[in-house]
C-alpha cells in the first residue's frame, strides 16, 4: 500500500462511520419497517401526498436554483469586474451572510415580508397598496428565503470561472468589432459556463435538503420533502416511510447530479 | 504613460502599404505598447496616428479594423476552429454562404483542413497559432498586427511558422506589423526593422541597413555579435597597432566590427591586428574563439572547422585582419 493511501484512511474511516453506516441503517429500515419488503417504497411512490411533496420539492428547488444562480452571476460580475470600491462592497455583501445563522435569516425575511412586516407597512404608509399583500406562508417566501441563503454559495464557482477568463480574448472580440452585448452572450457567458454548471450543481443539491427556511417561511402551506421526512419521524412515527423517502431522494439527487456532471464535462473549456 | 514613466517617447515612423515591419527590442522597450496603440487598444497621451492621410488617433480598435494576433493567441475556447474564424465575419454581417466559403478558404490557407470542427484545446500550439492568423486575416484587414506570435513555440515549429508567415505576406500583400524580441526572427522575416530601446525608436531600416550600418551602439550590440575596440588616443589605430580607420573615426572613440567580417591575416592584408587566443568553444561546424588585443579588450571570432586546419592552441598568438569598409566608428 502506498503511504498516501494510508494517510487518507482516517478520513475514509470517519466518513464510513458517520455517513455510510447510518445510511445503510436507513436503507435497512426502509425495507423492514414495519413489514419486510417493498411496501414502503410502493407507498412513497404512489401516495398522492408524498408524490405531491416530491414534485413540489423538485419544482421549487429548480426555481430556487435558477433565481440563485442568475442573481449570483450578476453579483459575481460586480465582484470580479467592478471598480475597487464596488468590489469591496460586493465582497462584504457576499461574506456577511455567512456569519448569520440560517434561522436568523429566515426570521429576518419573516419580519420583512409578513402581513404586518416592514415591506407591507411601508407600502401601505406610502399609499401604494390598501391592504397587506400576502408574501409569507407561500412559495414566494420560500423561494426568496432559500435563494437568499444559497446565493453566496453560488458565487464562488462563478468567481473561479470568471477569474479564469483570458482578458485578451475579450479584447480580441472587441477589436473584431463585436458589440458589448454580443461579447457578453457569445463570448463571456459561454466561457464561464463551467462556473454556471458548478453553481447550479451546488445550489440544487443544497436546496433539496432545506428544512428550516421552508418550514418557517412556507408556514406549512408548501411542505417540502425534508419537512415530510421530519413529520414521519417525529409526529406520526412511520420510520420505514421516512427511510424509503430518504433513499428515493438520494437516488433522485444522484441521478440529476450524474446528468449534470456529464454535461459539465462538455462545457469545461 | 504609466504614472510618470513614459512607455514611449518621440517615436515617429512611417509604415508603407505592403511592408513587413518588425518592431524589435528587449522587453520593456515599448515595442508592444507601440503595437497596441497602433491597433487602438491603448490611448496615446500625446502625438498622432495617421492612416492613409486620415487622422486615426481617436479611432477605436473597431474603427481601425486592423487584424490582430495576440500573444497567447486569444482564441475563443468554446468555439471550434471554423467558428473562431467565422466570428469576425459574423460581426461584420457577412452572408452565410460567403462566410462558409471564406472560412473554408482560410482553413485551407493556413493548412488546417480536417481540423475545422476541433476546439482550440484539442490543437497543438502551432495549430492554434494558425487559427489565430486565419481569424485575424479572414476579413482582409488593411494591416495585420502580431504581438510576439511565436514566443510560445519550440524552435523547429517557430522556423516553420516563420516560413508560413513570410508566404502569407507574399501572397496577400497585406501590411504586417510584427513585434518580437528575437533579432534573428526580425531580420529573417521583415522588409523593415524598427529597433526600440527604453521607449525610444533607435533606428528603422531594411534588415541589411540596420545590421550593416547600425546608427548607434545599442543597435550595433543588439543585432548579432559585435566586437567593439577603443581607439588609441591619437586615433590612428587600435591597441597600439596602426589601422586604416573609417573616414569619420576621428569624431568617435570606438570602432566596431562584426566577427564574420574578420579573418586570419594573409600577406596582402592592410589591417593586421596581433591578438592572443584566450578561449575556444567547439560548436560543430565552427569554433568560437575569444581573442585578446594588446590593450586587453576581448574580440569574438569564428573559425570554420574544415579538414586539415588544426585549431590554434590557447595562448597562441594570431593576426586578424579586416577590410576598412566593414568597420564602423561608434
Image (spheres, coloured by chain):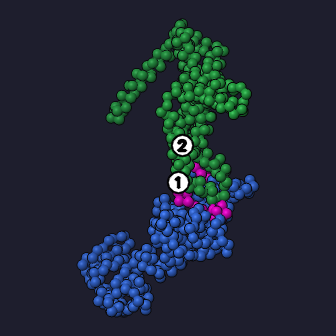
Chain colours: A green, B blue
- Is residue B77 found inside the magenta-colored segment of the image? yes
Image-based side of A56 in relation to B299, left or right: right
Extent of the magenta region: B60-81
A226 in relation to A204, above or below: above
Q: Which residue lies at the image location 52% right of the left edge and 66% below the top edge?
A: B1
For residue A90, the mark is: 2
> Which label belongs to residue B306?
none
User: In the rendered view, does A160 fall on the left or right side of A1?
Assistant: right
| Vertical position of residue B56 compared to residue B274: above or below | above
The chain letter for the residue carrying disc 2 is A
Is B111 situated above or below A41?
Answer: below
The single residue placed furthest to the left in the displayed view is B315
Residue B310 appears anywhere in the view: no
On the rendered image, what quadrant is the C terminus of chain A found in? Answer: top right
In the image shown, does A155 or A212 lie closer to the viewer?
A212
Whether the magenta-drawn stretch holds residue B323 is answered as: no
Please name the residue shown 28% across and 78% down the image.
Answer: B277
Mark 2: which secondary structure? helix
* Element type where label 1 sits in the image: loop
Quadrant for residue A250, please give it: top right
Give the x, y percent position of residue B199.
49, 71
Question: Can you see residue A94?
Answer: yes
Mark 1 neighbour class, 10 Å CA radius: few under 14, some 14 to 19, many 20 or more: few
Whole-percent x and y of residue B105? Answer: 67, 59
- Residue under circle 1? B124
Question: Residue B135, how many percent across, how many down?
Answer: 63, 58
In the depicted view, which residue is nearer to us: B88 or B300? B88
Q: From the image, state whether disc 1 or disc 2 is nearer to you.
A: 2
* Chain under callout 1: B
The kind of secondary structure the magenta stretch mainly shows is loop
Amino acid at each position: 500500500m502506498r503511504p498516501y493511501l494510508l494517510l487518507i484512511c482516517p478520513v475514509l474511516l470517519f466518513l464510513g462511520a458517520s455517513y455510510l453506516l447510518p445510511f445503510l441503517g436507513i436503507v435497512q429500515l426502509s425495507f423492514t419497517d414495519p413489514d419486510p419488503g417493498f411496501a414502503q417504497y410502493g407507498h412513497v411512490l404512489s401516495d398522492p401526498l408524498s408524490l405531491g411533496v416530491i414534485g413540489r420539492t423538485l419544482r421549487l428547488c429548480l426555481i430556487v436554483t435558477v433565481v440563485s444562480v442568475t442573481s449570483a452571476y450578476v453579483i459575481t460580475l460586480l465582484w470580479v469586474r467592478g471598480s475597487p470600491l464596488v468590489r469591496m462592497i460586493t465582497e462584504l455583501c457576499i461574506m456577511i451572510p455567512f456569519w448569520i445563522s440560517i434561522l436568523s435569516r429566515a426570521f429576518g425575511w419573516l419580519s420583512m415580508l409578513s402581513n404586518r412586516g416592514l415591506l407591507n407597512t411601508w407600502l401601505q404608509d406610502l399609499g401604494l397598496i390598501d391592504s397587506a399583500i400576502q408574501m409569507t406562508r407561500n412559495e414566494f417566501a420560500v423561494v426568496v428565503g432559500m435563494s437568499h441563503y444559497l446565493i453566496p454559495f453560488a458565487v464562488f464557482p462563478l468567481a473561479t470561472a470568471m477569474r479564469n477568463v483570458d482578458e485578451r480574448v475579450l479584447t480580441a472580440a472587441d477589436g473584431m468589432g463585436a458589440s458589448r452585448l454580443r461579447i457578453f452572450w457569445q463570448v463571456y457567458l459561454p466561457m464561464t459556463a463551467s462556473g454556471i454548471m458548478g453553481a447550479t450543481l451546488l445550489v440544487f443539491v443544497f436546496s433539496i435538503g432545506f428544512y428550516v427556511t421552508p418550514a418557517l417561511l412556507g408556514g406549512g402551506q408548501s411542505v417540502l420533502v425534508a419537512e415530510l421526512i421530519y413529520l414521519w419521524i417525529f409526529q406520526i412515527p412511520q420510520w420505514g416511510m421516512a427511510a424509503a423517502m430518504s433513499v428515493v431522494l438520494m437516488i433522485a439527487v444522484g441521478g440529476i447530479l450524474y446528468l449534470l456532471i456529464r454535461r459539465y464535462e462538455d462545457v469545461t473549456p | 504613460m504609466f504614472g510618470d514613466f513614459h512607455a514611449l517617447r518621440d517615436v515617429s515612423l512611417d509604415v508603407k502599404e505592403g511592408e513587413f515591419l518588425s518592431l524589435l527590442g528587449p522587453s520593456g522597450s515599448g515595442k508592444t505598447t507601440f503595437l497596441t496603440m497602433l491597433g487602438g487598444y491603448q490611448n496615446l497621451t500625446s502625438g498622432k496616428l495617421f492612416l492613409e492621410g486620415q487622422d486615426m488617433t481617436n479611432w477605436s480598435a473597431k474603427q481601425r479594423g486592423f487584424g490582430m494576433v495576440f500573444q497567447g493567441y486569444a482564441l475563443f475556447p468554446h468555439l471550434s476552429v471554423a467558428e473562431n474564424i467565422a466570428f469576425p465575419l459574423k460581426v461584420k454581417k457577412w452572408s452565410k454562404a460567403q462566410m462558409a466559403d471564406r472560412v473554408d478558404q482560410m482553413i485551407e490557407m493556413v493548412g488546417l483542413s480536417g481540423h475545422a470542427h476541433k476546439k482550440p484545446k484539442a490543437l497543438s500550439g502551432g495549430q492554434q497559432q494558425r487559427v489565430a492568423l486565419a481569424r485575424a486575416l479572414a476579413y482582409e484587414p488593411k494591416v495585420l498586427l502580431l504581438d510576439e506570435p511565436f514566443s510560445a513555440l519550440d524552435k523547429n515549429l517557430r522556423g516553420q511558422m516563420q516560413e508560413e508567415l513570410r508566404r502569407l505576406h507574399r501572397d496577400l500583400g497585406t501590411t504586417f506589423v510584427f513585434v518580437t524580441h528575437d533579432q534573428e526572427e526580425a531580420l529573417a522575416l521583415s522588409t523593415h526593422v524598427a529597433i526600440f530601446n527604453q521607449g525610444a525608436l533607435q533606428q528603422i531600416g531594411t534588415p541589411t541597413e540596420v545590421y550593416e550600418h547600425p546608427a548607434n551602439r545599442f543597435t550595433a550590440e543588439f543585432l548579432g555579435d559585435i566586437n567593439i575596440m577603443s581607439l588609441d588616443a591619437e586615433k590612428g589605430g587600435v591597441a597600439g597597432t596602426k589601422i586604416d580607420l573609417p573616414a569619420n573615426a576621428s569624431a568617435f572613440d570606438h570602432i566596431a566590427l562584426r566577427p564574420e567580417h574578420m579573418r586570419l591575416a594573409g600577406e596582402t592584408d592592410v589591417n593586421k591586428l596581433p591578438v592572443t587566443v584566450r578561449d575556444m568553444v567547439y560548436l560543430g561546424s565552427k569554433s568560437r574563439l575569444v581573442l585578446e588585443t594588446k590593450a586587453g579588450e576581448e574580440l569574438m571570432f569564428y573559425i570554420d572547422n574544415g579538414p586539415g586546419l588544426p585549431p590554434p592552441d590557447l595562448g597562441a598568438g594570431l593576426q586578424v585582419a579586416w577590410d576598412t569598409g566593414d568597420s564602423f566608428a561608434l
